[in-house]
Image (spheres, helix red, strand yellow):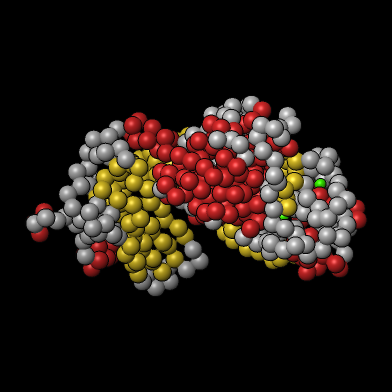
Amino acid sequence: MTPASRLTALISGATLIAAGLSAAPAAAAPAVPDGLTLVTVKHSLLGDHQWFQQTYRGLPVLGGFLVKHTETRSGAVTTEDGRLAVNGDVTPLAAVGADRARASAITRDGGQVTRSQLVVVPGAQAVLAWRVLLDTGNDSRELLVDARSGAVIRSESLIKKVNGSGKVFNPNPVVTLQNESLKDASNANSAVFAPAYSTVTLTQLNAGGKLKGAYASNASASAVTSTTNVFNYNRSQAGFEQVMVYYHLTRSQEYIQSLGFTDVNNSAQVYKTTGLTDDNSFYDPSTDRLTFGTGGVDDAEDAEVIWHEYGHAIQDDQVPGFGSGAQSGAIGEGFGDYWAYSMSSAVSANTATTPLACIADWDAVSYTSTVPHCLRRVDGTKVYPGDVAGEVHDDGEIWSRGLFDIFNALGRVQADRIILEAQFSFAPNTTFTAASNKIVAAAQALYGAAAAAACTTALHARGFI
Ligand SMILES: [Ca+2]
Ligand SMILES: [Ca+2]
Ligand SMILES: [Ca+2]
Ligand SMILES: [Zn+2]
């Protein structure tokens, strides 16, 4: 680029201040210097504050501003110049129309357009872009769409995220305390539980003091609130389960994103910890909502139950209507248990007292008499087809053992990347064999022949392939 072709919208601050000062007396309308548009005038105790939007060839320059403060008493004027350099030849004519830009934005993030305008994005090579605002239902997003190509340059949430804190079990008190003798005692808190509570950071919260954030949204009755975003409850208080689910869903989604996936249930998962007194929890695909029952130990006091249910939400997001057949239903239950196993592996010791393969160690104390107390295990010995019982949770143990073996052959990160990647290709009514072949193919594509062979070995051992 030749120096002569470089353009800049910046004029000197001295010129501008001079223009402002040379304007009419205070009572008259404020002067509007060239390249700036008056946005608003605010009146404070000590003076007036004129805010200007920087413009370039008549278009707003994103983020560029200038403010002029006039002290009422002395008449002194100070200026803060927040204008930004606009370099390069920005032609203020859009090749891409507003309709196409809006369509690009909706394709990227969904939702409905609330506003669109042509802007200049400043920088070393300034760009003409459409600024499109979207309401996606659980977020408000600002997208910049290149006005030459129609490509989305940037997408950001306009909702301020805050961190809070709260007390949780992580994953559950049986594992943390290495104590298989714990009792629910009708939801009573007691000293024995004290060392089982962890104080954690609640990330991704929307401003507003509720347990609503980027990846989890509390829809429980009498939902707890905190103006300071501190959510400390014990297990006898209804707020405790609400915090448990918020935290463990959010951690799950943050882990998924750390694997590189940006489109695996990447939205605020709605959940309820109230209204169901059964000893059961479920994901409802018709409402995209998780409900946690309070029978026996409150289900949401055990993170492994929360993660199991999130597994259903993950698969339903990846494959609309997933789990419509007997085997795909079992794959759904098996994956939920496996997801609980994988998530728990990051926070659980694998001991003789509480083997990592034991799922829902705490919830299960209410309905099992042998130790360790397990809702199910992921290290069973059942094989397809001889051990198929025709019940999705039971048959899910065949699937979860296959995933367990992949995890232990390849490690957590590779196993989870392979399994999540493969699930995008599962049919809603997939079979053990078809799903196994997708996993082997994903392993081959992501990590090569040795990883594919490890998956084949694990799934062959279960009789699937
Ligand atoms: Ca409770
Ligand atoms: Ca329960
Ligand atoms: Ca466990
Ligand atoms: Zn389930």
Q: How many marks?
A: 0
Q: Which of 121 and 235 is in front in this view?
A: 235
Q: Nearer the viewer, residue 389 or 328?
A: 389
Does the image show residue 332?
no
| Image coordinates for residue 98, horizontal then vertical, percent | 33, 33
* Residue visible at 32% across and 40% down in the picture: 151
Q: Which of 395 and 36 is in front in this view?
A: 395
| Image coordinates for residue 33, horizontal then vertical, percent | 26, 56
| Image coordinates for residue 421, horizontal then vertical, percent | 49, 42
Q: Examine the rendered structure and indicate whether residue 108 appears above or below residue 25.
A: above
Q: Is residue 206 left or right of residue 64?
A: right
Quarter of the image where one finds residue 230 = bottom right
Q: Is residue 307 left or right of residue 197?
A: left
In the picture, which quadrant includes the C terminus? Answer: top right
Q: Examine the rendered structure and indicate whether residue 101 appears above or below residue 260.
A: above
| Image coordinates for residue 141, horizontal then vertical, percent | 46, 45
Q: Examine the rendered structure and indicate whether residue 22 appears above or below residue 277.
A: below
* Residue visible at 77% across and 54% down in the picture: 361
